[in-house]
Image: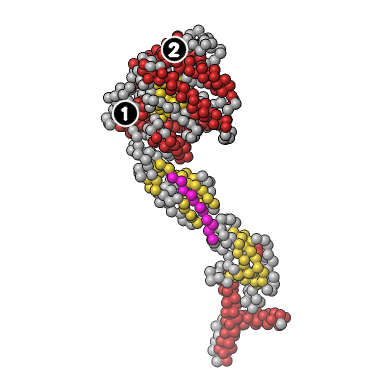
Amino acid sequence: MKAIRKITSVLAASAVAAGTLAAFPAYADSAEKTPAEMTTAELVRDMGIGINLGNTFESCGSWIDASSPQNFETAWGSPVITEDMIKGYKEEGFGVLRIPVAWSNMMAEDYTIDQAYIDRVMEVTQWALDADLYVIVNIHWDGGWLNNIPLNEEEGLKKYKSVWTQLCEAFKDVDERVMFESLNEELGVWADAGLWNQYSGTEGELKEKSYDLGNRINQLFVDTVRASGGCNADRHLLIAGFNTNIAMTSDPLYKMPTDPQNRCALSLHYYDPFNFTHQNTLSWGSVNDYKLINDNMDIVKTNFIDKGIPVIMGECGFGTELMTKTEGDAYEYLEAVIDTMYSRGICPVLWDINYSESDKREDSIYSRYDCRLTNPDYKQTMQKVIANGLKKPNEITAPDTVSVIYNEPMQALDVSSLSGGKLNFSSTSNVVTVDENGVINASGTGNATITIYSETTDEYLAAFKQIKVNVERNPDPPDAPASSMTVGGSVKTTDDIPLADGWTWKESYTIPETGSVTAEAVYGDRNYTNRTVEVTISRETADTSSAADSVSSSNNDSSSSTASSAASSSAASSSSKAAAATSTTTSSAAQAGEPSPNTGTAAAGLGLAAVLLAGIAAAKKKND
């Protein structure tokens, strides 16, 4: 929704120019503490906003030459990583670099990792530390062996422990700015190995076994790291959520591991809506789009942050090319991602890969070729998000339900928000819509849900409220016909009787010569209650009818044809009286011997009156 799009980058640019934002603000009040002295919550906050070194050391495949780490490093499109690339991440404003790794790429049958592979990952890690970045190192998908642990649990856990034992030894003297992450998304993805299929919706023993295995793997991770000594004894650890999914990790069956040091954070991923971030949906930015991401981040805050469990959103953003989306929508989404997360105390770590094709370089967030963000404005967006810090909860004041009458004037909803942020409205119905001012427009009757969205501000979180709207039928349609009417002699059926716009006769009714007929008129719009009216139609009697066609109504607001009928009858009566009067006047004048002007005209008028009177008398005698 382009009307909702916030030009944060422009505002941030103005703020930087005015000197209201530092070149890049400190992430937390704990800046004077060392990572070893910080709590995990403080360290996560100090990380700020992060980015993934994606499709690099986790690249894998049997077709890759396993003779050197660089062959894997470049297999999925990345150039060989250089120190300048890593420095560029810091210079562009990132605080933490996540390095996904497939450790099986160069591994012996006894699970011994080739030292060259460990050394190369450690080299890049050291460059990041030298650039004053935090680093997250994990076991990534790694060819999928983690998904098969249930098939041979003993052997699978043996390999898992072996990998972390070797990494702990390699990193034991590296300071606590390096965080270990237990797993990627594979924790719980075991349907193909005979355990619970989380997409089937079933509950029961297989689900419990899946969660139990996941909990035991995370506990094995913590126990292995803590037992290895050195800096690992106090190292901050990142615990994989169940499939790193917000809802599944919120399940009571999921348990954070026991850590004697109490230095664990939770790893979650967020790619909703998936059809936008990974598939062919091109646009994003509606009220409901904003509601979805805010609702999900509220769940994370309520279920974890507020309970003292720090959260790192280890992957978020896009798994497809940014520039394939509707212009501006990709970065509107990326702005919403970091703002909704960071403002609630969650550390967002954007997923990013490198595209080797020159015409796709802008599809990455960060260009490893140019060592910069592909969209310079996004740096200012990150600055502004970090400068705003945690935001206060917002609240919308509005009625829960609203009832309106169809086709009556509508008033704007009585709505306000605590933040004073811009209000946006959307409806679930095409029949009941709402404009930008909150005025309901009903093109029919029925029910709808209106969502009100108060945009985030520098101080307040976004807020949403849903109102149930019931549009009731209007009792009486406009311009209903009268309950009775009389018609002239030329009106044979109701087809000859016009009705107001929207009204039609239910069928063609014949008007009898004597008596009356009851006809039904129907209003076409079904959103009215009294849309059928019975009309009694009778024919005018002979002594009141006229040669003119006529339809008269018993209502006071008679139609023009009624007035025409009355005028015609009155004119005929006046003509007879005038003829008689003329005849009398002429006769008197002649007897007095006075000249009579227009004597010929008067005689002609007298003759015509006599003919008319004779005709009327004959007709009356015949009727008698």
Q: Nearer the viewer, mark 2 or mark 1?
A: 2
Q: Which residue is mark 1?
A: 28
Q: Position of residue 578 (x, y in %)?
A: 57, 81
Q: Nearer the viewer, residue 322 or 62?
A: 62
User: x%, y% of residue 129?
Assistant: 35, 17
Mark sitting earlier along the chain (2/1): 1
Measuring 44% from the left and 12% from the top, which residue is drawn there? Answer: 118
Q: Amino acid at mark 2?
A: Ile
Q: Relative to 386, is 474 above or below?
A: below
User: In this rendering, does residue 78 appear at all?
Assistant: no
Report the residue marked by disc 2.
Answer: 118
Three-letter code for the amino acid on which mark 1 is drawn: Ala
Q: Residues within 10 Å of mark 2 (few under 14, many from 20)?
A: some
Identity of the residue drawn at 39% across and 46% down: 396
Report the span colored magenta: 465-475
Picture coordinates of residue 331 (x, y %)? Answer: 43, 30
Magenta stretch holds residue 469: yes
In the current view of this chain or complex, which residue is farthest to the bottom? Answer: 592
Q: Mark 1, residues whose alpha carbon is within 10 Å: few (<14), some, or many (≥20)?
A: some
- For image coordinates 35% across by 37% down, the residue present is 391
The structure's colour scheme is: secondary structure
Q: Judge whether residue 527 can be spotted in this image.
A: yes
Q: Quadrant of the C terminus?
A: bottom right
Mark 2 lies on a secondary structure that is: helix
Q: For residue 601, which quarter of the picture? A: bottom right
211 shown above or below 295: above
Q: Could you tell me what secondary structure mostly forms the magenta stretch?
A: strand
In this rendered view, identify the residue nearer to me: 319 or 605: 319
- What label does residue 543 carry, if any? none
Toward the right, the furthest residue is: 622
